[in-house]
């Protein structure tokens, strides 16, 4: 199988951006309830919140998934998520917050625009906590996975060239 050509990726991203609801919101063409903005990202209230105050932190540029985002944009998203979470804890009387990313459709991502969800929580809010299953893994399988993933991460870091979306 061959790697997709850069121009094919760029064309697909341009088409995706043109039809992206969140890009329309960022461009001011669709109404939203903005709670935060900086040079690289915005925070808006989710229209179908898990809890009142559920915020989506979005990069202003279109990136379908986190790995396509440059580190500077990712840094801005996480700093923004921290600020918003802190404000929820201080001023919304939240007792905690869920901060998560659904990265790809297999992980539950519904829209092809990367984002961070920040959900203010209280102990009695009725929102089910995200629980990870705990599967058993043989030590020899864990060793193989460690070696494989570590090697592939190192190789990916050496090969990585960011995908341009503009």
Image: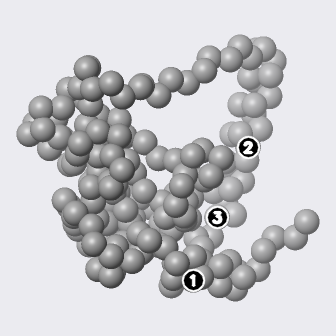
Q: Is mark 1 on a helix, strand or loop?
A: helix
In the picture shown, does residue 153 fall above or below 142? Answer: below
Please rate how many residues cluster around mark 2, counting C-alpha atoms within 10 Å: few if below 14, some from 14 to 19, many from 20. few
**Quarter where residue 148 is shown:** top right
* Disc number lying in front (2 or 1): 1
Lower position in the chain sequence, tag 2 or tag 3 = 2
Q: Label 2 belongs to which residue? A: 151
79 left or right, relative to 21: left
139 left or right, relative to 16: right
How many discs appear?
A: 3
Residue, x 36% and y 28% (percent of image)? 127
Q: How far is the residue under mark 1 from the one under mark 3?
A: 21 Å
Where residue 153 sits: x, y (%)?
A: 67, 48
Q: Label 1 belongs to which residue? A: 14
Label at residue 153: none
Where residue 122 sits: x, y (%)?
A: 23, 26
Label at residue 160: 3
Question: 46 or 95: which is nearer to us?
Answer: 46
Please rate how many residues cluster around mark 1, counting C-alpha atoms within 10 Å: few if below 14, some from 14 to 19, many from 20. some
**Quarter where residue 139 is shown:** top right
Question: Quarter of the image containing the N terminus?
Answer: bottom right
Q: What element carries label 2?
A: helix
Q: How far is the residue under mark 2 from the one under mark 3?
A: 14 Å
Question: 116 or 144: which is nearer to us?
Answer: 116
128 left or right, relative to 45: right
Where residue 132 sits: x, y (%)?
A: 55, 24
């Amino acid at each position: 199988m061959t790697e997709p050509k850069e121009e094919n990726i760029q064309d697909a991203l341009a088409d995706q951006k043109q039809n992206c609801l969140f890009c329309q919101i960022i461009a001011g063409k669709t109404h939203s309830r903005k709670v935060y903005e900086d040079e690289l990202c915005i925070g808006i209230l989710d229209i179908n919140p898990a809890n009142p105050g559920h915020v989506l932190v979005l990069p202003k540029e279109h990136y379908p998934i986190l790995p396509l985002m440059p580190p500077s944009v990712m840094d801005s998203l996480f700093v923004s998520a921290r600020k918003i979470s802190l404000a929820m804890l201080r001023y919304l009387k939240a007792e905690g917050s869920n901060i998560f990313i659904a990265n790809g459709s297999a992980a539950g991502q519904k829209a092809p625009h990367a984002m961070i969800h920040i959900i203010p929580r209280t102990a009695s809010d009725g929102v089910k906590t995200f629980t990870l299953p705990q599967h058993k893994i043989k030590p020899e399988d864990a060793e193989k996975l460690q070696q494989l993933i570590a090697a592939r991460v190192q190789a990916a870091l050496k090969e990585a060239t960011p995908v341009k979306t503009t």
